[in-house]
Image (cartoon, rainbow, N blue to C red):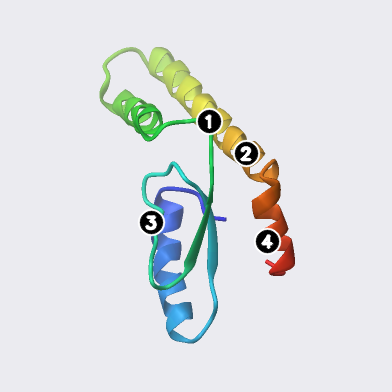
Amino acid sequence: VPTDGSHWLSMREVLGILSQKGHEIVVVAPEVNLYIKPSKSFELKTYPVPLTYEEMENEFKGFLQLSFEEGSFLTKFLKAYQGLKRLGELSVQSCESLVKNQELLRYLEESKF
C-alpha cells in the first residue's frame, strides 16, 4: 500500500526486480493518484476516494508553490503548516476509504495479503 510520490517511485523499481524473480505482487492504491499506474510487474487493485484527480493535483501544486512565494518566515511557515495539514487530511480520507471498502478488504483477506 504505497504512498504516491517519491516513496512510490523508489518502490516501483524494487517491485520490478521482485517480479523478475518470480514474486507475485499486488499493489493497493487509491484510484485517484499521481504516479501509481498499472504495470506488467504487479497487479494493481484500486479503491475509490472522495477526490478528483484535478483536486489532488491542485492541492500538491499549491503546496509546492509555497516554496516560491515571498513573505516573512512566519507567514511562509504557517502556510506550509496548513498545506501539510491539508495533505495529511487527504491521506486520512484515503485510508478511511480503503478500510471502508468491504469488497477490496474481502479480496485482500481471501488472498492472504
Label 4's element? Answer: helix
Could you tell which of marks 3 and 1 lies nearer the N-terminus? 3
Position in image of residue 100 (x %, y %):
69, 41
Image point 40% across, 52% down: which residue? 6
Judge by depth and name the residue closer to the eye, 86 or 108.
Answer: 108
Give the amino acid at mark 1. Pro
Question: Which image quadrant: the C terminus?
Answer: bottom right
Up-down relation of residue 113 to residue 60 (above or below): below
Give the amino acid at mark 3. Lys
Give the CA distance from mark 3 to mark 1.
19 Å
Q: Which residue corresponds to mark 2?
A: 97
Question: Pointer 1: residues within 10 angstroms few (<14), some, or many (20+)?
Answer: few
Could you tell which of marks 4 and 3 lies nearer the N-terminus? 3
Q: Which residue corresponds to mark 1?
A: 50
Give the CA distance from mark 4 to mark 1.
22 Å
Judge by depth and name the residue closer to the eye, 110 or 4.
Answer: 110
Label 2's element? Answer: helix
Position in image of residue 27 (x %, y %):
53, 61
Image point 43% across, 14% down: which residue? 74
Q: Which residue corresponds to mark 3?
A: 37
Q: Residue 69 — which label?
A: none
Asked which quadrant contains residue 68, the reply is top left
Q: Which residue corresponds to mark 4?
A: 108
Label 1's element? Answer: loop
Could you tell which of marks 4 and 1 lies nearer the N-terminus? 1
Could you tell which of marks 4 and 2 lies nearer the N-terminus? 2
Up-down relation of residue 100 to residue 11 (above or below): above
Give the CA distance from mark 4 to mark 3.
19 Å
